[in-house]
Amino acid sequence: MQLTAQKNLSWHLRLGYSPFTEDKIGIGAAYYPNNSHWFHQLEIYPIQNRASSIVTNAQNFGFLLQTNYSLAQSKKNPVFFLGAQVYGYNYSRQLINLPEQVETDAVAQLMLQAGIKFRINKRIQLGVSLPFMGTELVNSNGSAGTDFHATPLLLFVYGFVQPKLGIDIALF
């Protein structure tokens, strides 16, 4: 068995927090190719219970995939970046007054984003990103029937309520 470390740390464990979405906490990975301005992040949001007084058996699973371009070398501090993200989730629940009906929503948000990262030390980075423009695709199936719609999203209309905060901890 052998354990090695790279001089330039490429792979990071990612812990994310999205305060204004239902998913809240995400875990995943970040990849920073050597000598590149590009970096990529993937987060998975585990199943969570979002039950309320009129909903039972609520379950949610989500993911976030981001591809970003840093506007400066990654060794500088802070680093501003622009990128694109896909945030998606599948939400199912039963309404108390319709126990035989399962309602489901599948949602995908395709967004452009801007953000900033701070390198705390060699192994830890803190970052904040803010989606500012894109579209939301929703496929609903429930007691009201099936519905598919797309909604354009702009920073001052919708995107500003969904900042993403993350901590990247270098693995190797």
Image (tube, grey):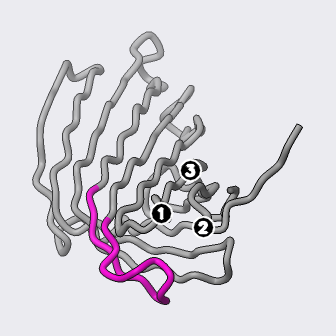
Q: Which element type, helix, strand or loop, lies under badge 2?
A: loop
Residue that carries the numbered disc 3 in the rendered image: 29
Kind of residue at badge 3 = Ala
**Which residue, given by chain and number where applicable, does mark 1 sit on?**
34
Query: What is the C-alpha distance between the residues marked 2 and 1?
Result: 7 Å
First of labels 2, 1 by sequence position = 2
Q: Is residue 35 above or below residue 134?
A: below
Which percent across, then down, holds residue 158?
A: 23, 64
Cβ atoms at labels 2 and 1 below 8 Å apart: yes
Secondary structure at badge 3 equals strand
Q: Farthest residue toward the top? A: 100
Q: Which mark is residue 8?
A: 2
CA separation, marks 2 and 3?
16 Å
- Image position of 145 (left or right of 99): left
Q: Is 27 placed left or right of 32 in the picture?
A: right
Q: Residue at 46%, 39% (x, y): give it.
A: 62
- Residue type, numbered disc 1: Asn
The image quadrant where one finds the C terminus is bottom right
x%, y% of residue 75?
50, 82
Q: Which residues are magenta?
A: 69-84
Residue 152, located in which quarter of the rendered image? bottom left
Q: Nearer the viewer, residue 24 or 114?
A: 114
